[in-house]
Every structure is written in structure tokens, then in C-alpha cells.
Amino acid sequence: MTFLFDLVLLWGLVRLGWGKLEAAAFGFVVANTIHYALGRTWIFAGTERGLTSGYAYFLINAALGLAITVTLYAAFLDYTPINYIVARVLVSVFAGLAVFLLNAILNFRRL
């Protein structure tokens, strides 16, 4: 759900004249903040970590995800003819898995 929001935001911001990398980074941050709220409520309900400290860990993990996203996305945009939305979907496999695992293991302590 949040990834679809991320893609729609990416598309909309690019249509408004934003650069693809900037739009992808902004969409990533917004969508991941929403994802944290939903994940804390639905997926990792009952976690012992407090809201503020949990969000701080989440932001640290998301920074790694953002670095992976921007780096791989830039490579796809620069070195392949792949459409920018398709490139973002492909990149999300790696970045999304990395962020999920870091949060599950380090933040919510559930894996």
C-alpha cells in the first residue's frame, strides 16, 4: 500500500518538474514514514520499543534503504533504457528487503 503511494508520488512529482532522483528520495521518505506507522500498529503490534526510540531506529534503517534506493536508481537511470517507474520497482526489491529485515531484527526484535 505504501509502495503504491510512493510510486504515485514519484510519478506526480516528476510530472510537476521534479528530478527523478529527488522525487524518488522524497517519495521514499514519505512512504516509509507512513509504513512505520502502519507496521508498528499492524505488523509489529506489542513491540516493547517506545514510539520515539522506535522511530529513531526506523529512520536510521531507512537512511540505509534510501542510500540503496538512490544509488541503484541512479545506476538504472544512467546505464539502462528502463522506464523510471519500472526502475524504481526493481530497486524496491533490494531496498525494501534490506529495510524490512533491519527493522524486524534491530527495531522490533521479531526475527
Image: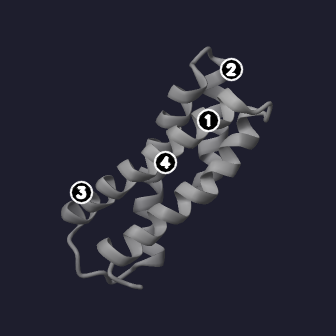
Q: Is residue 66 above or below residue 78?
A: below
The figure's colour scheme reads one colour
The residue depicted at 70 percent of the width and 41 percent of the height is 87
The reply to whether dot 1 and dot 4 touch (C-beta < 8 Å) is no
Identify residue type, mark 1. Ala
Q: Are marks 2 and 3 in contact (CB under 8 Å)?
A: no
Q: CA distance from mark 1 to mark 4?
A: 11 Å
Is residue 55 toward the left or the right of residue 31 in the image?
left
Separation (CA) of disc 4 from disc 3: 19 Å
45, 98: nearer the viewer: 98
Q: What residue is shown with label 3?
A: 56
Residue found at x 50% / y 27%: 22
Residue at numbered disc 1 = 75
Q: Which one is in front in this view, the residue at disc 1 or the one at disc 4?
A: 1
Tell me the mark number nearer the camera, choosing from 1 and 2.
1
Residue at screen point 30% across, 71% down: 107
The Cα–Cα distance between marks 1 and 3, rounded to whole angstroms, is: 29 Å
Residue type, numbered disc 4? Ile
Give whichever of discs 1 and 4 has the lower sequence position: 4
| Local secondary structure at mark 1 | helix
In the rendered structure, which disc, 1 or 3, sits on the residue that comes first in sequence? Answer: 3
Q: CA distance from mark 2 to mark 4?
A: 24 Å
Could you tell me which secondary element the residue under label 2 belongs to?
helix
- Name the quadrant containing residue 17: top right
- Label 4 crowd (10 A; few <14 / some 14-19 / many >=20): some
Q: Secondary structure at mark 4?
A: helix
Mark with earlier residue (4, 3):
3
Q: Amino acid at mark 2?
A: Arg
The numbered mark at residue 15 is 2
